Image (spheres, rainbow, N blue to C red):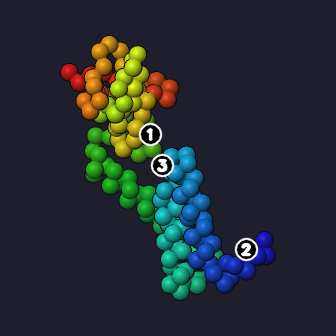
Amino acid sequence: MDALVTLYSTQPFWIWLAFGVVLLAIEAALSTEWLLWPAVSAGLVAVLTALGLRAGFAVEIGIFAALTVLATLMSRRLVQRVNPTDYPDINARDSRLVGQRARVVQAFVEGRGRVFVSGAEWAAEIDGDAPPVGDSVIVDRLEGPALKVRPVA
């Protein structure tokens, strides 16, 4: 613990940068969509400390909190502007997929294949005739970890 306090007193940049990287790693591993903006905010505080901000840990925590709140609120406005038909909760990614058009990226065999939608590849299931790779399907619902899709009419 003393080494951490000593490192912070001499190089707060590394503490904030490490905190941001840990938050970003957790976000990448779990896809929570909640930790991206705190990770960015920690990175910004790291930059501020590297540029000479030496206001003390309590002030840096306050700056981090304010940046996190500001970035989160701004991201909500951005998402609403870019995707006005999406549900208001930006963290309900799975439920936002229903009704979206997806592209078949792996052929359906016995009703199972893979589709690409909303920037990610998903396991998918289809009843009846399956479209070939490259064609579009519509997401009907989520069934466990897979999307239930139907051909575009």
Q: Which residue is mark 3?
A: 33
If you read the primary sequence from the N terminus, does the residue marked by circle 3 or circle 2 appear first?
A: 2
Mark pair 3, 1: CA separation: 9 Å
Classed neighbour count for the residue bearing mark 3: other residues with Cα under 10 Å, few (<14), some (14–19), many (≥20): few
Q: Secondary structure at mark 1?
A: loop
Q: Amino acid at mark 2?
A: Leu
| x 42%, y 34%: residue | 122
55 sits left or right of 139 in the view: right
| x 60%, y 65%: residue | 19
Can residue 99 be spotted in the picture?
no
Q: Amino acid at mark 1?
A: Ala
- Tell me: residue 85, above or below residue 36: above
Residue placed most toward the observer, 62 or 23: 23
- Tell me: residue 98, above or below residue 65: above
Q: Amino acid at mark 3?
A: Glu
Q: Which residue is mark 1?
A: 92
Mark pair 2, 1: CA separation: 37 Å
If you read the primary sequence from the N terminus, does the residue marked by circle 3 or circle 1 appear first?
A: 3
In the rendered image, which quarter contains the N terminus?
A: bottom right
Please state the horizontal and vertical placement of residue 43, each as a whole percent of the image.
51, 69
Please state the horizontal and vertical placement of residue 65, each as a whole percent of the image.
54, 65
Can residue 78 be spotted in the picture?
yes
| x 54%, y 67%: residue | 42
- Tell me: residue 13, above or below residue 114: below
- Residue 87: which quarter of the image? top left
In this view, which residue lies farthest toward the right?
2
3 sits left or right of 75 in the view: right
